[in-house]
Amino acid sequence: MSVIENTQNFVKKQLKNAESGHDWFHIERVYKNALLIAKEEVCNLEIVQLAALLHDISDHKYNGGDYEKGATETKSLLLSLGSEPQLADDVSKIVSQISYKGAFVPDIKGSIELSIVRDADRLDAIGAIGIARAFAYGGSKNRALFSPEIPHVLHESKEEYLKNEGHTINHFYEKLFLLKDRMETPTAKEIAESRHQVMVDFVRQFLEEWNVKRSIPN
């Protein structure tokens, strides 16, 4: 089997019992998003495929906040599967750079392959599935749906963002509502428009039913 097939089998087994917002089905959706975006770009498809499959191999939200562990594990795995060292390096670099680190923390600019996989991952964080994933993750951490007295915070560092344990509705303001304007590829920008609107409509309805007034971005 190819390195891609072996990687796919490994990740599917590794994430078999993962939290539903970060399980194999999430990886599969990101993989498909990445392939869709890659069709319109000049890129190394093998790097895109492997980075999409491995981007959550060791998510910082579940490994104690280590942003680099995923890249280390990615490189070790790919080399063990017979990957060329340069390919393993290229993929692990993307894995280390993909994560959102706060509203005021700029995204690292890199290769087109990084942009494709980061956009693909962020598309799965917004829209109807993004809403479901947000509440699935919040539930797994025993977080409140909403606490009217707790305002959202636009974090200025990855450390501040990582320590945040706010309620789930705040996550829309602190991250999800911001992703539309951080898409980098034309394909992702187009898809993000309608998915963003789904979230805006949902949060507006949620706050209306809670009988709370709070501004909502366009």
Image: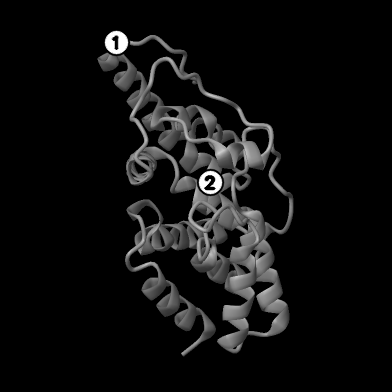
Residue 79 as seen in the image, left or right of residue 211: right
Secondary structure found at label 1: loop
Residue 177 shows up from this direction: yes
* Camera-side residue of 11 and 196: 11
Circle 2 residues within 10 Å: few <14, some 14–19, many ≥20 = many
Q: Which residue is painted at 41% across and 56% down in the image?
A: 22
Marks 2 and 1, how far apart at CA:
34 Å
Residue type, label 2: Ala
Secondary structure found at label 2: helix
Q: Are marks 2 and 1 in contact (CB under 8 Å)?
A: no
- Lower position in the chain sequence, tag 2 or tag 1: 2
* Camera-side residue of 10 and 130: 10
Labels 2, 1: front one: 1
Residue 42 shows up from this direction: no
Residue 79 screen position, x and y as percent: 63, 84
Colour scheme employed for the rendering of this structure: one colour
Residue type, label 1: Asn
Residue 132 screen position, x and y as percent: 32, 42
Position of residue 21 relative to residue 38, above or below, is: above
Q: Which residue is mark 1?
A: 211
Position of residue 83 relative to residue 133, above or below, is: below
Q: Which residue is mark 2?
A: 188
Residue sticking out furthest to the left: 209
Quadrant of residue 51 within the rendered picture: bottom right
Residue 138 screen position, x and y as percent: 37, 40
Position of residue 132 relative to residue 218, above or below, is: below
Quadrant of residue 214 within the rendered picture: top left
